[in-house]
Amino acid sequence: QVQLVESGGGLVQPGGSLRLSCAASGRIFSYPMGWFRQAPGKERECVAAIGRSIRRTYYADSYKGRFTISRDDAKNTVYLQMNSLKPEDTAVYYCAAAYKPNSGGYFTESRDYDYWGQGTQVTVSS
């Protein structure tokens, strides 16, 4: 059983940076992972995803070059480094794990994921 807990959110000024962490109580080694966001009144959408292979990554267009997803299997943790933050990035960010141990790829749809964290609020404002 995998349990995920996000942390690292908060209030930051435009242009600033945050690093979100997703700590797993169960091992997530070989699990594809994803970061999703949900703004008020909006549907949940994929921000970034990473496969079993760390070279298999995905970023939504609006985050390319600004956000970086990574995983540290020794710490059983997935990260989302968020740079050059904009007010439009304000949302609750969720991490998710997919039980697909035979896949080396990434997944970008919510329905592909089996485990979800509670989310962490990111607010970008001056």
Image (spheres, grey):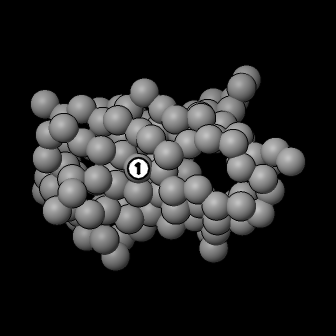
Q: Position of residue 44 (x, y in %)?
A: 57, 34
Say which of 13 and 60 sits in front: 13
Q: Position of residue 49 (x, y in %)?
A: 43, 56
**Residue sitting at the far right:** 126
Q: Position of residue 11 (x, y in %)?
A: 69, 42
Residue for point 48% across, 32% down: 119
* Amino acid beneath label 1: Ser
State whether residue 112 is above or below residue 29: above
Q: Residues within 10 Å of mark 1 (few under 14, many from 20)?
A: many
Q: Quadrant of residue 102?
A: bottom left
Is 124 left or right of 6, judged from the image as shown?
right
Residue for point 26% across, 63% down: 72
Task: Classify the position of the N terminus by image quarter.
Answer: top left
Is 34 left or right of 31, judged from the image as shown?
right
**In the rendered image, is residue 48 in sight?**
no
Q: Which residue is mark 1?
A: 21
Say which of 99 and 116 sits in front: 116
SS for dot 1: strand
Is 79 left or right of 61, judged from the image as shown?
left
Say which of 27 and 64 sits in front: 27
